[in-house]
Amino acid sequence: MDRSAGGSNIAYDYSQRVMGEFYGVNQSPTVIVFAGIHGNEKAGVKAINMVLEKIKDGHMRFEGNLYFILGNINALNKHVRFEKVDLNRIWRNENLQDFKNKSVDLSAESREQFDIFEIIQKILSHGKGPFYFLDLHTTSASSVPFITISDSLNNRKFSSNFPIPVVLGIEEYLNGPLLTFINEFGHVALGFEGGAHDDPVSVINCEAFIWKALVHSKCLKRDQIKNFEHYQLVLTESCCKYQFFGINYRYQLEPDESFVMEEGFENFEPIRKGQLLARSNGKVIRAHRSGRIFMPLYQELGEEGYFILHKISKFWLKASIVLRKLKINHFLRLIPGVRKEKGNNYTLIVDPKIARFMAKEIFHLFGYRQQIYKDDKLHFIKRDRKVTGFE
């Protein structure tokens, strides 16, 4: 396969799912990098090709293991985001169980999913931890690079090595992302958004992120990387001031909704309450609150029109660290209407009548995210977990 950085007409086959794999002298840690989970996001794939060439030319000596994995190969070859369903929205245990039982006809994306799942299983069974899962993406809007994470303390700690914005808790608004699935097994998992889909700078940003991640994970020493200082500057100079953000609001698209975002919005751009943001079925949509616009939709396929962000205070971040390390979250179970799910130490079941008097931010502070309504109850899932293997 031609691994040149620039070619957009490269055809991939399934034997190329693992683009590259390297084994270190210490076999620890293990870094797994995904690209092309969405077929219209090729900057990460091109960045991996560039890194592979430099690894080959540099004869690098790895301390830990490294894997580069292609995502939706079928969609990449067809130059579409996905064919039937979004590959980054189907990572749920019931889907994997259907595959194991062969109880359903598989979509193109489901076949991709189970191929990737089996590769991850093999890596976890043969490699040594800690494991770092990194997923490279780009956006339909113009954007500075940023990181998305599930708000676990190990994710926060690793993401703080990068001088770019970090968005916490997006998994509460998305159903079935790959990284949320991985996080539930306790591993570090970061999503990196390198910039706009077709912006050549996005490739450069993704490459810089890979090199920095390899150094900060201790998989590779910085003196092994030629011009490492340059890669540090790439992210520092291209970004807004480093901050943590949370999500206040998601505009979810309905089936067959005709949604058109107003032109010109960029990620993290301040917006004011009442500002015109989009049109839906010919009607105007205005911001119901002030904040910062996030992931405005400028492509045909998508499930969210936009998000609205708020800046998270340093006090809240520090307080949540202290509370989680002291394991004060166990006291939540003493509140009437709150109980632990039987056989599951990571889930709290909350009576909605009680939840009305307990802001969701309180559960966030103690490290829980709201998952679903089930049997007329709210289920809150703990983000910080002990590391376990896939079943």
Image (cartoon, grey):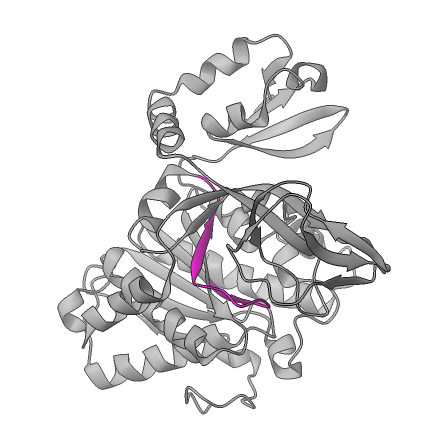
Residue closer to the observer: 284 or 204: 284
Residue closer to the observer: 276 or 229: 276
The residue positioned 38% from the left and 33% from the top of the image is 317
- The answer to whether residue 387 is visible is yes
Image location of residue 185, percent across then percent down: 47, 43
- The answer to whether residue 28 is visible is no
- Asked if residue 292 lies left or right of residue 379, the reply is left
Residue closer to the observer: 237 or 107: 237
Question: For residue 214, which quarter of the picture?
Answer: bottom left
The residue positioned 37% from the left and 22% from the top of the image is 323
The residue positioned 55% from the left and 73% from the top of the image is 41
Seen in the picture, residue 59 relative to 29 is either above or below; the reply is below
Seen in the picture, residue 83 relative to 4 is either above or below; the reply is above
Seen in the picture, residue 46 relative to 106 is either above or below; the reply is below
Residue closer to the observer: 356 or 376: 356
- Asked if residue 67 lies left or right of residue 302, the reply is left
Q: Is residue 138 magenta?
A: yes
State which region is magenta. 136-151
Image location of residue 348, percent across then percent down: 58, 23
Image location of residue 241, percent across then percent down: 35, 53
The residue positioned 39% from the left and 28% from the top of the image is 320
- Asked if residue 65 lies left or right of residue 368, the reply is left
